[in-house]
Every structure is written in C-alpha cells, then in structure tokens.
Amino acid sequence: MKEQERTGKKNTGLDRLFRPRSLAVLGASADSTRGGGFIWWRVNEHGYLGKKYPISRSSKELNGIKCYASLSDMDEPVDMIIIAIPAAAVESVLVECARKGIKFAVIHAAGFAELGEEGRTLQERMIKAVRSEGMRVVGPNCMGIFSPDMRLNTIVELDEADLEAGSVAFCGQSGWASENFITGGTARGLRLSAAISSGNQADLDLFDYVSHFGGDPKTKVICAYAENVGRGNEFFEMASKVGTAKPIVIWKSGFSRAGTRAAMSHTGSIAGNREIWRGAARRSGIVMAEGFEELVDMAVSFSSPLSPKGKKVGIMAEAGGGGISAADACEALGLEVQPFSPALKKRLKDFLKPYLPPFSGVSNPLDVVWLPRDVAFTICTTCIELMAGEVDAVITMSYLPFMDAEFRQQYIEALCRLRDKLNLPIFMVPPYASRAAGAMKEFTIAGLPAFPSFERAAKALSATCGYQEWVRSV
C-alpha cells in the first residue's frame, strides 16, 4: 500500500495487457507508412486472435472490418487501445478511454518528456488525469507489444516460424532495442513469451514489467534494455525476489556524459551512475549485459533446459587452436578448465586410438582433429559421455553438424538424449560463424545453446554459473 500511496499507481495486473481479448487502434488507416497504418497492418497481418476495432476518420472499413469515426462512436468493450495520433490530442482521448473503462492504453505518439520540460509537463498532466480511473499506460513514445500467445505484434515484422511462443520475456526502453532483440533473438533460436517497448515509461515502467514477468508461468528468463531504473531500492528488492526463481538479464545504457544526454532526449530518462548500478545489480542477482550481443548471448545461455552445477568446463574441439582459445576465455572468466584425471585420459586414449593420429591430445581441451564423416557422430557423443563425470558443462565445436544439414538433425537428437541422460549442459560453437546462422538457430531451439565464438560461449556460460552461485547464496 505504501508504494501505491507514494506513486499513485494502482497494482493493476498486466495479464490483459499482454493477452488482451480485444483491442482498438485509434488512428488506424490504410496507409501502412503512417503510424496508425502500420500498427493496424501488423495487428491484422499477424492474425491477432482477439476482437479488433479500427478507429479512423479517413476510412469506412479496413480489411473488411468496420471503422469507427471516433472513440465516442464505439460501444464495444475493449481491454486495450493503441493510440497513434499526434501528441497534442492524446490527453483528451486518454481521459475518454479511461471513462469508458478501458484498462490499458499504448501510446505510440512521441512528443512528450523526451522533448524537454514542456513535453514532460504534458506527459505528467496526461497520466495524472487518468490515474484515478484505474487505467494503466504503456509509453508514450513506444512501439507497443509482442505477445505470441495472442498473435499480437506491433513492434517488428517476423517470419511465421518466429511467432511461436516460448519462455523469454523482454522489456525495452527503446523501439530500436526492442526490434533488435526480437529479430536478433529469434534469429538465434530464442522463442519469446512476451515483449514490450516501454518508451518514456510515464506510468508502467521496468518495475511493473519485471514484476509481471516474474509471476508469469510461461516466462523462464527475463531480459531488458534500460536507460533508467526507477524506484531505486524498491526495484532492486523486487528483482532479488524474482531472481531467485528466474534470471533477470539487463543491458543498462547511458552512463557516459554523451549517453546520458542522448537518453534524456530519447525517452526523457536520467541514466545514473555506472558503479552504483553495478553494485546494486550485483547484490540483487541481476545479470549485467554489456551491449546487445551479450544480452542475446545470455538469453540463449539461460534458455538452456539445464544449468551447470559448478564451474568445471570440458572443452572438445576439432581444432587445436579453437580449444586453446576456449580454454583461455574460460579461465579469464573464472571458469575451471582442469586437466582430465589419468583414468579418464586412459579411457579417452583407448577409445580414440583407432580413429585419431597419435599426436592428438586427450587432456582438457580435448583435440579430436578433423573427424571422418563415418565416425564423427560416434566419437563426439562417446567423448562427451566419457568426460561427463569430471565436468559441469561442455563447450564443443565440430564441423559436420554445422556444415551438413542431413547429419545435423541426427547429431542434435543424439546430443539432446545425451544431455538429458547425463544432466549436462552442452554449448555449441560453429567452425565458421559467418556460415552457420541457420544451424546455430536449430541447435538453440533444441536446447543446445549455440554461440558465434568460443569467447562468447565462455562469457555466457560464466554468467550462468555466476547467477547459480548467487541463487545458492541467498
């Protein structure tokens, strides 16, 4: 109750925001190059499963659906309205929406706090006018929502296959970051439970979204791009509770003077101090990503169906140099690449003797050279099974499964069975990342996280281990 009294925000559940039974698009048009036009196009094109109502002064109907000339002409109840009209007209419309009992408004329009004091005043007045009615607001200055369960996507175009629902949730205080996480993440094999472009966060903010995702049974990993983190200690206290059950990965930007100025003009945010952020995040168990690539890599790592029980890493590569670089990367991040025991070395040597030249090493990293096609499958799976008793996770690189699609499916199925049998996370690295995008996606979807390089695999694995250590400590 104290939080509500302090902020005036009601603790409205967000289920109907991410899974609305019905929605209206105010400012819809047949012109997909305009804000309301492309939002309507995306709502319709992706096959939103609820009832949809276009509100447009320029059209009588859109895609065979009757248009309403104004909000006042509508009697149908809706869970959400997406507002895509100029900023100056938003306040009066928002008040009307609240009085009609619409619980959620997504304000696409820009022209508020990001423009300075005058815009901030308009934004604050607008939110104050509807708060007493119990309405909650996304934005303004945002791209909206991606909810695969409802086939609702106002953020970015996707291939049909990438609309499949999954377990990774995302909140981005930037339309660009949201678009990139959705497109870049799904291209790597991530499947999302929900995503939101939060914009200026005049009402609903990172606290609300992380809290909601924390209670969402379909979400297993929570990711975010943040320019500011509001509500201070309350946010970190909430995050530490959510984090004991689900990893929270945040890419926080805007620490430099130039970045702070840009954040202020982008979403009206005050970015904050890097060291204060890092200290508070670390204590709360938040996993910190440095940039877009790390954010996606860590989401891929945490999407693995298994987590490592410790820091011991087994490395197997069909390239000596690759194994060395993997070992360097792991040890630099505090992971342990311990030599295999004499007994394990003997078992590996005896098994590999018929297949590999005598100069091949059987320590850790394990160098299996260039495997012939007819034995590659047997060698890779058997070596992983042999080393499983002495490691907590495996990072492996093999040529054939990344270069031969027919071989890949058999390999993926076998590794998945092995992973589950051994209770061992297996991380994949391709020989040539520039030619392996599709294969990496297949591995990750199957629960075998794939990364473009040994260094990035090691960083993601290190983050996973660090998070598990924090969970065990609280």
Image: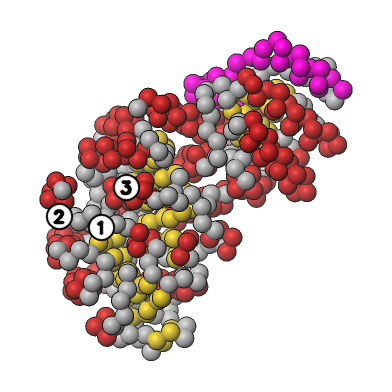
Residue bearing the label numbered 3: 211
Q: Distance between the residues labelled 1 and 2?
A: 12 Å
Where 113 sits versus 474, above or below?
below
In this image, 188 relative to 408: left or right? left
Helix or strand or loop: what does disc 1 sit on?
Answer: loop
Residue 66 at x, y percent in the picture:
40, 86
Q: Between disc 3 and disc 1, whose residue precedes?
A: 1
The residue where tag 1 is placed is: 12
Dot 3 amino acid type = Ser
Residue 295 position within the rendered picture, expressed as x and y whole percent measured from the top left:
45, 42
Residue contact at pointers 3 and 1, CB within 8 angstroms = no
**Vertical position of residue 191 compared to residue 363: above or below:** below
**Could you give the CA–CA distance between mark 3 and mark 1, rounded to whole angstroms?**
12 Å
Quadrant assignment, res 78: bottom left
Q: Report the front residue among 440 and 132.
A: 132
Furthest toward the top, the residue is: 342
Residue type pointed to by label 1: Thr
Mark number for residue 8?
2
